[in-house]
Image (cartoon, grey):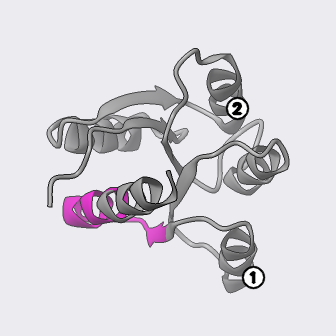
Amino acid sequence: MTVPRRRILCADDNFTVRKLVASILQKENHTVECADNGEHALQLIAESKVPYEILITDHQMPKLTGLQLVTALKISATQLAIIVLSGNLKSVEIVQYQKLGVSKVLEKPFVPKNIIDAVTNASILLTKSS
């Protein structure tokens, strides 16, 4: 099954993580843009002329945490598949993300295959819902 090319936003305050995620997904023919904090991600999503289809977000970020970002996006009813990529999440935080309907929660450190699989699964769900 060929996965459609997706427009992805990666929000993480760690430069190395942002660049690694972008590199992995660009090799899979996706378009990836990055934000260095939750507030910047929210701004990019709001101002984008072409909507992002998938958001990959860290949990612990300055200005807006991943949870605050996801909550804001769900309140605004943005149609966006969301993948949380974070280390040291508490089980209560994972449950909060799941209640908000995130596609996947991945732990850091991660292997490239896990990111690719999560994006592929989110892409399949997006295709089915459209």
Image x and y of residue 120, in percent: 30, 59
- Above-or-below relation of 118 to 96: above
Image x and y of residue 60, in percent: 65, 53
Q: Which residues are magenta?
A: 105-119
Does dot 1 land on a helix, a strand or a loop?
helix
Q: Residues within 10 Å of mark 2 (few under 14, many from 20)?
A: some
Nearest to the eye among marks 2 and 1: give it.
Answer: 2
Does dot 2 land on a helix, a strand or a loop?
helix
Q: CB of mark 2 within 8 Å of CB of mark 1?
A: no
| Mark 2 to mark 1 CA distance (whole Å) | 24 Å
* Residue type beneath disc 2: Leu
Residue at label 1? 92
Is 30 magenta? The answer is: no
The circle on residue 42 is: 2
- Above-or-below relation of 36 to 48: below
* Residue type beneath disc 1: Val
Q: In terms of image quadrants, where is residue 113?
A: bottom left
Q: In terms of image quadrants, where is residue 24?
A: top left
- Above-or-below relation of 92 to 117: below
Quadrant where the N terminus is found in the figure = bottom left
**Count of numbered circles on the image:** 2
Q: Depth check: give the residue in front, 69 or 80.
A: 80
Q: Image point 56% across, 31% down: which residue?
A: 36
Q: Is residue 98 left or right of residue 127?
A: right
Q: Image point 36% across, 31% down: which residue?
A: 32
Q: Image point 37% across, 55% down: which residue?
A: 123
Q: Is residue 34 left or right of residue 89?
A: left
- Above-or-below relation of 25 to 120: above
Counting residues from the start of the chain, the first of labels 2 and 1 encountered is 2
